[in-house]
Amino acid sequence: MLNTSKIRADFNILSSRNGSAPVYLDSACMSLKPNQVIEAMNDYYFNYPACAGRSSHKLGDKVTKKVKEARQIIAKFINARNEDEIIFTRNTTEGINLLANSLGLQKGDIVLISDKEHNSNLIPWLQLRDKIGITVKIIPSNEDGSFNLDNLSKLITGAKLVSVVHTSNLDGVTNPAKKIIEIAHKNNILVFLDAAQSIPHKKIDVQDLDVDFLAFSGHKMLGPTGTGVFYGKSELLEKLSPFLVGGDTVEFSTYENYKLLPVPEKFEAGLQDYAGIIGLGEAAKYLSQFNFKDIAEHELRLNTYITGELKKILQIKIIGPEDPKERSGIINFYIDGTDMHKFAVMLDEMADISIRSGQHCVHSWFNSKKIYNSARVSLYLYNTMEEAEAFIANLNKIIKIL
Ligand SMILES: Cc1ncc(COP(=O)(O)O)c(C=O)c1O
């Protein structure tokens, strides 16, 4: 079981305001950051704010060593075969763009995505369709939002890549990644997993999943804003042609020629966000002290309470399966014909409760269902039952007012 009071003491924003901390229920957008992460970043800026890799002085050597350590921590965190399978990016979106623009897809190649993808795993493929003529096919989900493996099997013949979300930011449903990968691999098709929402809440083992490529963001897993990771199997990364090149990606260059560095350097163009990378390593270290089962159980307890209370409010519809067990730490809800922004703004103004409203970057899904928008609560390891109760009490007040 998680010790939330101990955890909250690690988060300045939750512990320093003498009982008036915000009720933060928007971790699917951006998680809070523990002091350990902030201190690791400050240590870089205060004590060794130099370049990695290039400069042969003590400060530069320390940055190189710390970046290497962070890469090793992340490799261990997702059980990569080696640290060179870890490429630092700014976020999940950059990882997907890296893949889309490096895979060498040609006119007519088929990419399969689900009907619940974040814009980050939709637009890069649609843009390639418009630029070079790839074909993007959509795998329809079941009515309750769960993944339909039969639909995948029906569409898979001839595809080059299956690119799907692991845990959905729309409804919290976790797709059966292992089965998806098995089906794709039987057909010699590569699989990319968007792990932006799964990595903060689940143990990800890339070798056990046998996934070919995977991306996630640091800022949803207690790490610094604007940090991310793109993972690929070594032998596949070797074959990708990087889409960002320049300083730090080449072994040598002449006016006519150049030789790219090996993986991962060939993908990390220009000076990097060293403080961010070091902070991200610290976030993975921080998360590693917990058992992910305990985090999941904690979130389920709060989700079960909130779901039960929402069900009592007849107008409210929850997106995705009814059973909170199927929705990770996410409760996304709407009322037909109502702008849910009003709820988010009122919760914030009345009770300092932060939730997210809108279409959550899954516009395609909302447009297809003709739902205007929704309000999303997303839970994490630092949330408490008292916070869940405060959310429900204030939501009930707002329902009465409106
Ligand atoms: C499922 C999913 N994929 C991709 C993204 C994009 O992440 P980022 O904005 O960090 O690139 C998000 C962000 O909310 C997400 O929830």
Image (spheres, grey):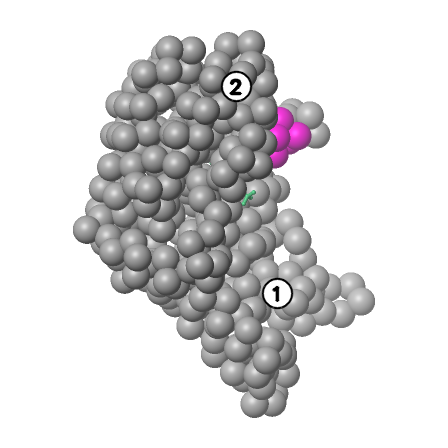
- Which region shows up in magenta? 121-128
User: Is 280 situated left or right of 270 in this image?
Assistant: left
Q: Amino acid at mark 2?
A: Ile
* Residue contact at pointers 2 and 1, CB within 8 angstroms: no
Q: Quadrant of the C terminus?
A: top right
- Residue at 66 percent across and 53 percent down: it is 244
Q: Quadrant of residue 327?
A: top left
Residue 374's place in the image compared with 385, above or below, is: above
**Nearest to N terminus: mark 2 or mark 1:** 1
In the rendered structure, does residue 127 fall within the stretch colored magenta?
yes
Residue 44 in the image: above or below residue 224: below
Label 1 neighbourhood size at 10 Å, few (<14), some (14-19), many (20+)?
A: some
**Residue 393 sits inside the magenta stretch:** no
Q: Is residue 307 above or below residue 279?
A: above
Residue at 42 percent of width and 54 percent of height: 19
Instruction: Please tell me the numbered disc located at residue 401.
Output: 2
Q: Amino acid at mark 1?
A: Gln
Q: Residue at x 33, y 29 (%)?
A: 306
Residue 80 appearing in the image:
no
Residue holding disc 1: 272
